[in-house]
Image (cartoon, helix red, strand yellow):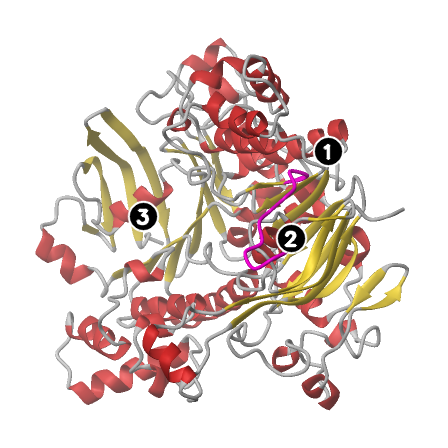
Amino acid sequence: MSALLEVADLTTHFMTRAGVVRAVEGVSFEVAAGEVVGLVGESGSGKSVTGLSILGLVDPPGRIVAGSIKLAGQELVGLDGESLRRLRGRRVAMVFQDPMSMLNPVLTIATQMRLAIEAHESVSKEAARTRSIEALAAVRIPDAAQRLDAYPHQFSGGMRQRVAIAIALLHRPALIVCDEPTTALDVSIQAQILTEMRGLVRDLGTALIWISHDLATVSSLASRILVMYAGRIIEEGPTAAVLRNPRHPYSRGLLESLPFRVEPGRDLQQIPGSTPSLLRLPDGCAFRPRCGQATELCHKMPLLERHERRAFRCHHPLPAEVGR
Amino acid sequence: MSALVEVREVSKLFAPRLSLGEKIAARLGSVIETRTVHALDRVSLTINPGEAVGLVGESGCGKSTLGRVIAGILSPTSGQVRIAGEPVMSGGRRPVKRTTRVQMVFQDPFASLDPRMRVGHTLAEGPIAHGLVSRTGAGAYVAEWLEAVGLDPDFANRFPHQFSGGQRQRIAIARALAMKPDVLVCDEPVASLDVSIQAQIINLFLKLRRELGLTMLFISHDLGVVRHVSDRIAIMYLGRIVEIGDARRTYANPLHPYTQALLDSVPKLVLADDEIVSFKAIHGELPSALSPPSGCHFHQRCPHAVDLCRSEVPQLREIEGGHRAACHLAPVVDHSSAHAR
């Protein structure tokens, strides 16, 4: 099966006055049609910039300096603004952490949805309205017909995120990139949106890249997981397998620092130090200064080694558990 | 054992200031539509010496307001907070905080530290003003507290922008502790930190509790974090505490339908390939605090609600061994169908 999205050696840098920020450094992965892939990492790991690069939304001083992004065989890197605009919203869409960053506060939802439809199709006002109501109903916004004429500020945070998802789904894109879409929401609202998202992608066959720092939300949604650290993918594999038996010390460190892994009141396992500056990355493996396993060998950048469906970038991987 | 912190029937209303025109209209007898937010509705809570109480709830439930009232940053509209028997706020028309026994740590360490003040100055300012340390002894005092939170004493000469988020939160904790408080109120102290840094700060709280015997109110929306650091936990919904009890027991056997639903909405790590997590999402959204529902605030979203729940406010009452819930139906709630949507 050929992949829907093929990202190869994607490298996105930001040319700042302080120097070159290597936000994404040689990232390669694929997403199959209808697949839900989780992209996990802490702040500064490059997960959001990877998502923005796919949509051609990296603004100066940022630039994709190398690599290729193919959507259903079509190369996206190097496309001009007009061609990208024709793709965005129709073939690939994005949902952000803060829905207000994409909703226009002075236009009604009806107007914004009509504009989003008209960007790619010529339809009558009535047809646009009907489609908007259907889209809002699909993400379970109650009284969609009335709510359509409201302004974004009249919606709660959870409802706004539903509107953003409804707009992303308008043209039935093959791929939606969701960047921390539930992080700003309360747990009960997050649970509602996760449940609905899962139903929608299953029914429509939409592929998702779900970017999050929260391993638990990702694990409840994604079948495959990519862990990023300092601009690179350091581990990849089927979600449950990676979480059960992480091979990279950083993935294990992240998992073990979660509170439920130990008795309440006991000290948590902690990763010492903090994430390195992307301006001054250590030589070799970027996790080396924080890693308990590091040796001389780690001054040389490890390659992403593939073993069947798993991959990890480490000279001293943790042992694979057998028989599980 | 007598309680160190006593919160008695505290209510807090936020009302917008009336404009001049509205004031005149009110004088002339017309009814002004008020937009009063009932942030806290007769909340009572006690914290014993050395105890850590976790306060959880969703945004808008009043947990931060309660924290600020306890810390003496906001004065309650009615009711009183006492620490070791002394009221936190003075009386009179414009109450002021009159104790240093309670200090606060805020969520955002980027906003809570003065960017133009050297860290040493930030830490020494309060203790000097309150005579805890002399100006000449301040340097050593600051160094001691920086070390206590795991920072290099030499950092005293630096400015906040030279530190990472986790380090800044350590500085904020040191600033609060340098006032030698009996009670520390922490409002989402790890929410804006990365997972690996969260663990470091949680461990710091655990260590400080062990070493200093701190009494803590730990406010968070993250149920996992709260469970880890708290002895008892209180769950708030729309301005009221709906359940309070021993942390382990409350997580294992929640009595209030809201607590049950909240615990069920937390995503769990999926470790099996074929496991499909079902979220039992709470139906509907948090009602507006401008016009809270009658009776039990949760009745519109509760699968068990009966007529009594719509008409009468349930009081917090003891269900079993110190575990209290504000539900007319507790403990008859049927756990298996508690989350039917």
Amino acid type at mark 3: Gly
Q: CA distance from mark 1 to mark 2?
A: 20 Å
Q: How many marks?
A: 3
Q: Residue at x 53, y 64 (%)?
A: B60
Q: Is residue B82 left or right of residue A54?
A: right
Q: Is residue B303 left or right of residue B333?
A: left
Chain for numbered disc 3: A
Amino acid type at mark 2: Leu
Q: Secondary structure at mark 2?
A: helix
Residue A16's spot in the image, x, y percent? 20, 29
The residue wearing badge 3 is: A51
The residue wearing badge 2 is: B223
Q: Residue at x 62, y 50 (%)?
A: B219
Q: Residue at x 59, y 34 (%)?
A: B176
**Residue B209 image label:** 1
Q: Mark 1 packing: few (<14 Cα in 10 Å), some, or many (20+)?
A: some
Q: Secondary structure at mark 3?
A: helix
Q: CA distance from mark 3 to mark 1?
A: 41 Å
Residue A63's spot in the image, x, y percent? 18, 37
Q: Is residue B67 above or below residue B237?
A: above
Q: Are marks 1 and 2 in contact (CB under 8 Å)?
A: no
Whether residue B224 is visible, yes or no, is yes
Chain for numbered disc 1: B
Q: Which residues are magenta?
A: B90-102
Please state, as top left, top right, bottom left or bottom right, where the N terminus of chain A lies in the image: bottom left
> Is B325 colored magenta in this rendering?
no
Name the quadrant containing residue A137.
bottom left
